[in-house]
Amino acid sequence: MNKVIIPAVLVTAIMAASAAWSQTAAPPFQNKRYFTMPLEKDPTREVGLQYVTMPPGAGNQFHRHPGEQWTAVQEGEVTFTVKGKPPQVLKAGDYNYVPRGTIHRQQNLSGKEARYIEMRIFDKGKPASEEVKD
């Protein structure tokens, strides 16, 4: 009887631990905003530049912005996904452009830290992003 109970208990414990580990929160992004200022000749919009550090396993949910965004990867890899399209892996030296309202997400699926810069031109006074539910 013990030959059956002990393996069953071990399997249950391993499954519970695996479930707990898979639910741990992804590490947060760290960003440093260099500047945000009114866009010349259009006071309804702002231009900003920021530096982002993304630890392994970090990422965000699908979201959209009230404006345009340009990203240039400086180190590591960032998996960029536009909803409904295959993921794209951007490596150091790669860049992309995200048009207004595009539903997308960024993730670091590699085992190394990723760093990139973002330039944004957003509508002034609106939240920087809006999460989109699946």
Image: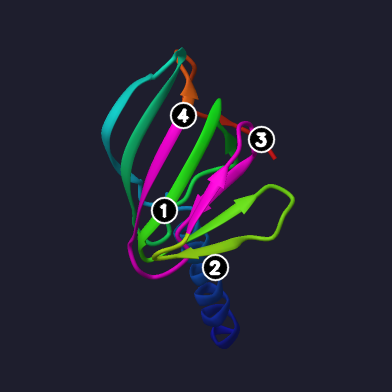
Tell which circle, 1 or 2, labels the residue nearer the N-terminal end. 2
Q: Residue at x 51, y 80 (%)?
A: 6
Residue 132 % position (x, y): 63, 34
Instruction: Kindly report the distance in space between the C-alpha atoms of the residues bearing marks 3 and 1.
Output: 26 Å
Please name the residue that numbered disc 2 is placed on. Answer: 15
Mark 3, mark 1: which one is toward the viewer?
Answer: 1
Please name the residue that numbered disc 3 is placed on. Answer: 133
Instruction: Kindly report the distance in space between the C-alpha atoms of the residues bearing marks 4 and 2.
Output: 46 Å
Q: Which residues are magenta?
A: 95-120
Element at label 4: strand
Asked where in the image residue 5 lies, by quadrant, the reply is bottom right
Residue neighbourhood size for the residue with mark 1, other residues' Cα within 10 Å, grouped as few (<14), some (14–19), many (≥20): many
Quadrant in which the N terminus appears: bottom right
Element at label 2: helix
Please name the residue that numbered disc 4 is placed on. Answer: 121
Residue 72, labelled with which disc?
1
Residue type highlighted by circle 3: Lys
Residue type highlighted by circle 2: Met
